[in-house]
Amino acid sequence: MSAVTHTPAAEPAAAVAHFSARLAFETDVSDVRADLLSGEPAIVVVDSRSGESWRQGHIEGAVHLPTAEIAARAPALIPRDVTVVSYCWGPGCNGATRAALEFARLGYRVKEMIGGFEYWVREGFPVVEPSGVRTRPADPLTAPAGAACAC
């Protein structure tokens, strides 16, 4: 018996609903980078990590707002008419999910940046560090040299 089809795939209509919902809740580092480069005013990127983590490195243009401070500080920092994009360390961390939940509870439209800070760095995007902005070589497993995902 097939390991893949042992549990049958969903009917197409259910698959459309599922994958559409995922795209409504998630975005990826490449799409966030494209919007930041274009100056897209409809998003605000929020780093929900600790101050120590923020100082180690963060996305240029992100707002530092640890999850525990969102309820108290977000209304004064984040306009209500934007889409908030939350990120934390990476796929092994659910901090961005917790931050997104806090923003949703406050009435914000929000998406989680899948891959988090880890995949931002792995794709070779610039990071603000104490010494300035630094770009590390892209990991060929996440951003093959000379190739665009074009997905």
Image: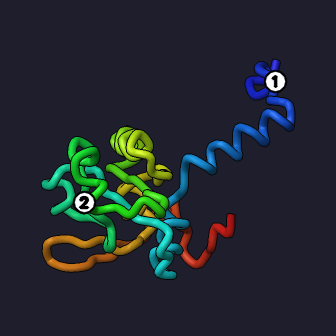
Disc on res. 8: 1
Q: Residue beneath label 2, please?
A: 64
**Residue kind at label 1, given as amino acid type:** Pro
SS label for mark 2: strand
Q: Measuring 32% from the left and 49% from the top, which residue is drawn there?
A: 89
Left or right side of 101 for 89: left
**Residue kind at label 2, given as amino acid type:** His
Question: Residue 130, how many percent across, how many down?
Answer: 14, 72
Q: Please rate how many residues cluster around mark 1, counting C-alpha atoms within 10 Å: few if below 14, some from 14 to 19, many from 20.
A: few
Toward the right, the furthest residue is: 12
Left or right side of 60 for 112: right
Question: Residue 114, how many percent across, how many down?
Answer: 48, 50
Name the one closer to the observer, 62 or 116: 62
Left or right side of 84 for 73: left
Mark sitting earlier along the chain (2/1)? 1
SS label for mark 1: loop
Residue 50 shows in the view: yes
Q: Measuring 53% from the left and 58% from the top, which residue is drawn there?
A: 28
